[in-house]
Image (cartoon, rainbow, N blue to C red):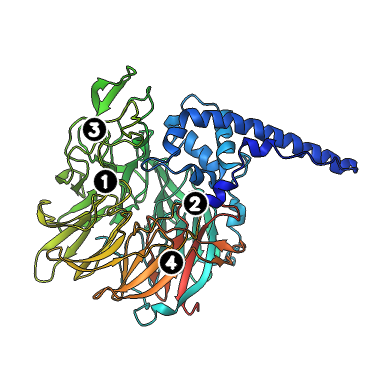
Amino acid sequence: MAAAVAGALMTHQAFGQAPPAPAPADPAIRDAFAARTLQRAAMAKMAAHGEEIFGQRCKSCHMPAVEHAPSRAELAAQFPNVIIDALKTGKMQPMAAGLSSDDIDAVAVFVTGQAPDAKFDLAGEAKNSCPAGAKFNPAGPSWNGWSPDKQNSRVATSTTITAANVAKLKVKWAFAYQGGRYGQPSVVGNRVFATSSSGQVYALDKQTGCVAWAYKARGSVRVTVSVGKNPKAASGWAAYFGDMGRNQVAVDANSGKELWVTNIDSGGRGILTGAPSLWGDTLYVPLSSFEEGVAGLAAYECCKQRGAVAALDIATGKIKWKSYAIPTTPAPFKKNAAGTQMYGPAGAAIWSSPTIDPKRGVLYVATGDSYTDVPEDNSDAVEAMDLKTGKIKWSHQMTELDHFLVGCPPQRPGVNCPTPNGPDFDFGSSPILKHLKGRKDILLAGQKSGQVYGLNPDDGSFIWQTRIGKGSALGGVEWGMAADDDNLYVGVADRGMPTLSALRLTDGALIWRHRAPEPAKCSFEGRCGNGYSGPSSIANGVVYGVNQDGHVRAFKAKTGEMIWDYDTAGRTYETVNGVRRQRGGNLDSNGIAFAGGMAFLMAGFNGASGSSGPDNVLLAFSVDGK
């Protein structure tokens, strides 16, 4: 988004101030000219109305951007339907309370400079269908779900990409997206499963990128797909994913035919972001939340949403049990300055994929911050839940009193703001369970505070803790880590000190640290950060870090020596689905996945539409591009 887009924003002034051109002599051309003139006038009127609403309801959080809120320029680079969906059914729904559809369309026109019907070209996105009769074959190298193992170590176990040939990696094929906020690619056998904020879920051929099937979800999808056996699927296999409307879905992995859909929560502010974890005949689905964004809504009964895990039967989608991260049901505790009843405790969203521990019969989750002033001890915590019942076996809170809402700066706090507003030290990454050589197991967790913890999985007690960053609402350990048998590899997104570090598993001691170089320029539209926000991945003794500046870098795991650096954003790609000169973009929330002789990475998490098209592309790498 940045200056290039900001300078070209089509505000209502831009719609209305173009000098009139001479009327053409040809009647047909003259009629078309008149129609365009009327359309410009209508757009200018809508934009003026949208600007008024934006100023009343949106400006305080977006100009300048506060906490997690995108900047005005970032909003300008989105597709209109992204803005409309966010206001009607998404995270900005509270801010749009009382607005009509025409009002919301007007905001989208003002923000993006595009007509409200300028939406994702999903038909074009799905071009290049696979040959008829092509079938899903689950056999072969895979990276299934968030991690190849259920302990979320993010170690590739079936790839031929090594330190010796990583420098030869080239793009074999690229697939263009029109929606960011995607899930990490899942690779199972001969298929790559991918999701997008457009709501499209794809199964692509691993070797060519052709589209085997496309499924239109009921809402945006940023969840990583998990694939497993299913007795109700004609192929015997199902792909599992959830959308931002809390709908968990199962489709046949071969055909994309829907098997079942289960809405896992009635709370209007819940969302699904973490990959579901599959174990036996049960799918474990984490529930997150966007209720953090209600600080300025005087009439909103803040807050009632709690993070949770739902255990679903894979054959039917029926919920076996559901366990809230905060066991206490929210109750009235005070009224805000506008007289609206407030509730608590609330929060402890679960953003990431659960970690399975069959030996102890539990799963581990890490939780987000609290939303209210009501004391509780389950936010900013690591918890162990019984696999069969969901009962919380233990919970270890790392940061007390982290009561936080977006839109609570000291100079203009919203009416629902906690007092004081917390530091927003969520856990956004999955815990990692590792077995120490000759010792007991260890559970590893990284927090946005910049702290990393080694815990006893039996009771959550500390084995060690190490600070590797200053931490902040958008810093510290954001979306994930990786661990081999010796070290934990942790990215830090701190502004001013973005690093990728190796910590020894046994005691948390620092083995090596790489500081990300300052980007020479913003090679993509969006915030020009250079933090290691996304999760690391490991393959054959090589650690891969993904950076917000669009670079994926490879390091020798033992020494930290950098042996490969690829800028996904500083170039364009000819895509297999017909989008020419598609650009890459920033890397955030998801890492690189390996299977066989190939690696897969999504670039363009911001989802910008941009002046030359969408900057979102799935890249498939292989040695020498073969």
Secondary structure type for disc 2: loop
> Is residue 546 or residue 228 the one in the foreground?
546
The answer to whether residue 243 of the structure is visible from this angle is yes
The kind of residue on which mark 1 rests is: Asp
Q: Which of the two discs, 2 and 4, sits closer to the camera?
A: 2
User: Which residue corresponds to the image point at 56% horizontal and 49% vertical from the top-left?
Assistant: 5
Choose the circle earlier in sequence order: 1 or 3: 3
> Is residue 383 or residue 419 the one in the foreground?
419
Q: Which of the two discs, 1 and 3, sits closer to the camera?
A: 3
Secondary structure type for disc 4: strand
Mark 1 sits on what residue? 426
| Residue 310 as seen in the image, left or right of residue 189 | left
The kind of residue on which mark 2 rests is: Gly
Mark 3 crowdedness (10 Å alpha carbons): few <14, some 14-19, many ≥20 = few
Mark pair 1, 2: CA separation: 24 Å
Tell me where residue 483 sits by quadrant.
bottom left
Mark 2 sits on what residue? 607
Give the residue furthest to the bottom.
Answer: 164
Choose the circle earlier in sequence order: 2 or 3: 3
Give the residue furthest to the top.
Answer: 339
Mark 2 crowdedness (10 Å alpha carbons): few <14, some 14-19, many ≥20 = many
Mark 3 sits on what residue? 420
